[in-house]
Image (cartoon, grey):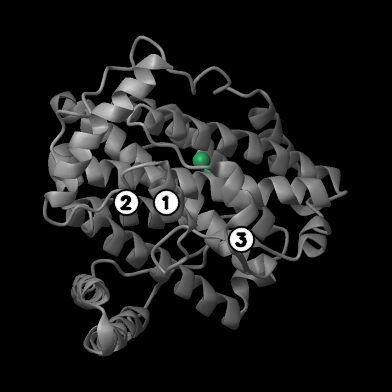
Amino acid sequence: MNVQAETHSADATTVEAGLAADNFSGPVDSKAATELAMQNTLLTPRFYTTDFDEMDSIDVTPVRGEWDALIAQMKADPNKGHFKKNEDWDHIDWEGMDPKLRGELIDFLVSSCTAEFSGCVLYKEMKRRGSNSDITTLFQLMARDEARHAGFINDALREAGIAVNLGFLTQAKKYTYFRPKFIYYATYLSEKIGYARYITIYRHLEAHPEKRFHPIFKWFREWCNDEFSHGEAFALLMRTDPKLTESFTNKLWIKFFLTAVFSTMWVRDHQRPAFHEALGVDPAWYGQEVFRKTSDISCQVFPLMLDIDHPRWRRGLDRLDAANRIIARAKRQGGIGGKLKQLAGSARAGLAFVSLLTIPAIKNEVPVSSRMEPAY
Ligand SMILES: [Fe+2]
Ligand SMILES: [Fe+2]
């Protein structure tokens, strides 16, 4: 306890330096971290609620063999002892860290913790409300994993004297309603892109260990295998009803979700230049690499993939990023002038998004069996 208190008071000086620094973006204490986690903007992780009865009525008979194998693998719990600090957990000199990097690292951890916990809340609620044992078993197992993930990140944050108040979030954060099919598309993608993000950082740091400025990255390989399995489960859920991926309208929805998830990641990552520089990663390279892995994987169930090599793709993403910077600057400016600039920025962001959405997609023949193993 003493150690923590000391770290906390020592942080106050760093925090002042941080606030003075340009573009300081991270929260400075638990209250600010929880406030950041409470935000519901287009770019921050949300909490979801859905029609739990409809989800509970899913019949997994059409994918029974693959389903039982996946559940058995998850029940075996290969990562049971993984999310604990051990001798590999290096000491972090939070006080000595460059304030900009520190702010962005904390922002990254808070946002990751919120995203992990968002999964936990949704999955736990499905388990609580359901009566279909196939569904409740799966959601219980996924909630178990996400609780570990969120808890582990919060442990890392505590060393900086900060923690996200997860209990408070459950009570107070706004829940966004999504129809079950939108939950499948969005959650499937967030699990698979989560896998691709974690494994890409892990492999990069495996090749450049000197860039590993925080020990949490060492935990990413086993961690992302959990996310991979969660994604597999959603792929199977979608395969129980071919309409979900084959009807004309649903194909449009899939394209929309792919574009929204990819472009949100692009904009968010470009908000953390110091973080990526410290990792030795160009956020544009990282983005495209993660999109490529996610696209390859999502061919297991989606009948289309985005053309991320299309000339308009990168241009659209950069325009979206530029529009987002205009909005952020306008928000800081405030007043009527700021509001007007914010509106103009939002219009530009909207146009950039539409331009991304109108890039022709690449058709994909979905294989008979969807099951994949994490191979990156
Ligand atoms: Fe997770
Ligand atoms: Fe997950």
Instruction: Answer left or right for 95 relative to 55.
Output: left
Q: Where, by quadrant of the figure, is residue 211 drawn? A: top left
Residue denoted by label 3: 48
Residue type, numbered disc 3: Tyr
Distance CA(mark 1)–CA(mark 3):
18 Å
At 32% from the left and 51% from the top, the residue drawn is: 290
What numbered label is drawn on residue 290? 2
Q: Earlier in the sequence, mark 2 or mark 1?
A: 1
Q: How many marks?
A: 3
Residue denoted by label 1: 193
At 32% from the left and 48% from the top, the residue drawn is: 27
Question: Badge 1: how crowded within 10 Å, few (<14), some, or many (20+)?
Answer: many
Q: Earlier in the sequence, mark 3 or mark 2?
A: 3
Distance CA(mark 2)–CA(mark 1):
7 Å
x and y percentages locating residue 145 in the rendered image: 59, 34
Assign ligand 2 to one image quadrant: top right
Q: Earlier in the sequence, mark 1 or mark 3?
A: 3
Question: Badge 2: how crowded within 10 Å, few (<14), some, or many (20+)?
Answer: many
* Disc 2 + disc 1, Cβ < 8 Å: yes
Of residues 53 and 207, the one nearer the viewer is 53
Question: Between tags 3 and 2, which lies in front?
Answer: 3
Q: Is residue 372 visible?
A: no
Question: Badge 3: how crowded within 10 Å, few (<14), some, or many (20+)?
Answer: some
Residue type, numbered disc 2: Val
What numbered label is drawn on residue 11? none
Of residues 124 and 32, the one nearer the viewer is 32
